[in-house]
Image: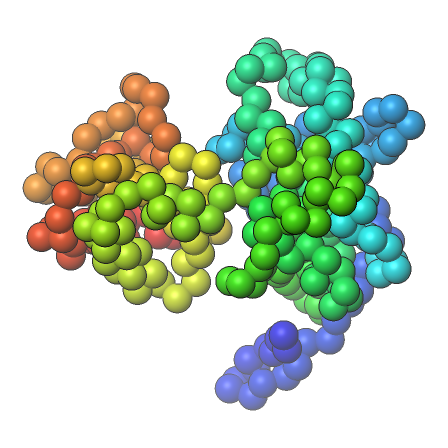
């Protein structure tokens, strides 16, 4: 991607100002982890069983731990190291919980963690085609994020997306003990996982709302989670879960922040629910789709 500065309608290409040290990149991420990802920062240089993890974080949305590694050298195997770290986490769950509780001064219980949603993120200025291909499995919780710094301190963050035809890691995992353990306990979810559980009517209804949401802004992304499908523009805008008879949607706004003159949403600020936000609505047809989109649009910042 080429970035330009618009100076009086004259485009001037921005020159890249590479990070000289991994530590620069690590410090940038750790100090901005909340606005970048909405994850909780736990510890830098977390040591466990002779291993050193660059950054340990916790994802409150998925109730899972996240390991972040920073790389400048492109000659390393992201999949081998990633699987090794995932195995390390699964074998020493108690150590991760103790570190969370001690670092944040909170009480996180073992049963409150969804270990199946654990993930490893590799952050680098660039990755080789081989590294990208080696992690291109739909059910492998290893992600690659390219981060570049340009002049004027402009930062570009580009998470590498898995291809729509990405295969499953399971056939390969059977040939490797570490891979097999990770494949059994850790799982990534796709839209198909949600759609396959419902009938054609609900599937079609979801696709109608999906299209309408994506039309609200060109940079909305879909991120399927365990219990719902998230629509994000930086942070969650709305989340949808597919049920047997209807859809449930949550709008990610705090109580009192949504203008809903028809009063079709329900206040769930005081009760447990899957999606993000304090507003929930049940959708059985597309009759109010335009009005519902006017509500969702309010969550776009």
79 in relation to 180, above or below: below
Front residue of this view, candidates 118 and 191 = 191
Front residue of this view, candidates 90 and 153 = 90
Numbered label tally = 0
Q: Residue 249: give x, y in percent of width and height.
A: 27, 40
Q: In the rendered image, which quarter contains the N terminus?
A: bottom right
Q: Residue 236: give x, y in percent of width and height.
A: 41, 45
Q: Is 232 situated left or right of 289 in this image?
A: right
Front residue of this view, candidates 197 and 29 = 197
Q: Residue 221: give x, y in percent of width and height.
A: 44, 56
Q: Is residue 115 visible?
A: yes
Front residue of this view, candidates 275 and 184 = 184
Give the image's coloring scheme.
rainbow
Q: Is 195 situated left or right of 6 in this image?
A: left
Q: Residue furthest right?
A: 50
Q: Residue 164: give x, y in percent of width and height.
A: 51, 62
């Amino acid at each position: 991607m080429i970035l330009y500065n618009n100076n009086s309608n004259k485009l001037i290409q921005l020159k890249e100002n590479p990070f000289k040290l991994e530590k620069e990149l690590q410090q940038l991420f750790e100090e901005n982890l909340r606005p970048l990802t909405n994850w909780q920062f736990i510890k830098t240089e977390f040591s466990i069983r002779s291993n050193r993890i660059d950054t340990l974080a916790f994802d409150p949305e998925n109730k899972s731990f996240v390991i972040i590694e920073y790389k400048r050298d492109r000659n390393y195997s992201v999949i081998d190291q990633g699987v090794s770290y995932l195995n390390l986490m699964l074998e020493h769950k108690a150590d991760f919980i103790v570190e969370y509780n001690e670092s944040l001064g909170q009480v996180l219980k073992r049963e409150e963690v969804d270990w199946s949603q654990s993930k490893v993120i590799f952050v680098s200025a660039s990755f080789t085609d081989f590294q990208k291909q080696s992690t291109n499995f739909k059910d492998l919780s290893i992600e690659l994020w390219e981060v570049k710094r340009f002049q004027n301190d402009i930062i570009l963050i580009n998470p590498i997306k898995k291809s729509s035809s990405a295969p499953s890691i399971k056939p390969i995992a059977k040939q490797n003990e570490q891979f097999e353990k990770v494949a059994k306990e850790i799982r990534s979810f796709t839209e198909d996982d949600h759609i396959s559980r419902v009938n054609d009517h609900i599937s079609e209804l979801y696709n109608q709302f999906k299209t309408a949401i994506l039309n609200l802004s060109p940079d909305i992304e879909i991120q399927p989670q365990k219990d719902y499908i998230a629509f994000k523009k930086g942070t969650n805008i709305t989340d949808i879960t597919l049920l047997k008879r209807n859809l449930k949607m949550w709008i990610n706004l705090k109580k009192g922040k949504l203008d809903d003159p028809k009063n079709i949403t329900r206040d769930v600020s005081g009760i447990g629910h899957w999606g993000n936000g304090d507003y929930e609505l049940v959708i059985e047809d597309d009759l109010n789709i335009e009005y519902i989109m006017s509500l969702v649009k309010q969550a776009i910042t």
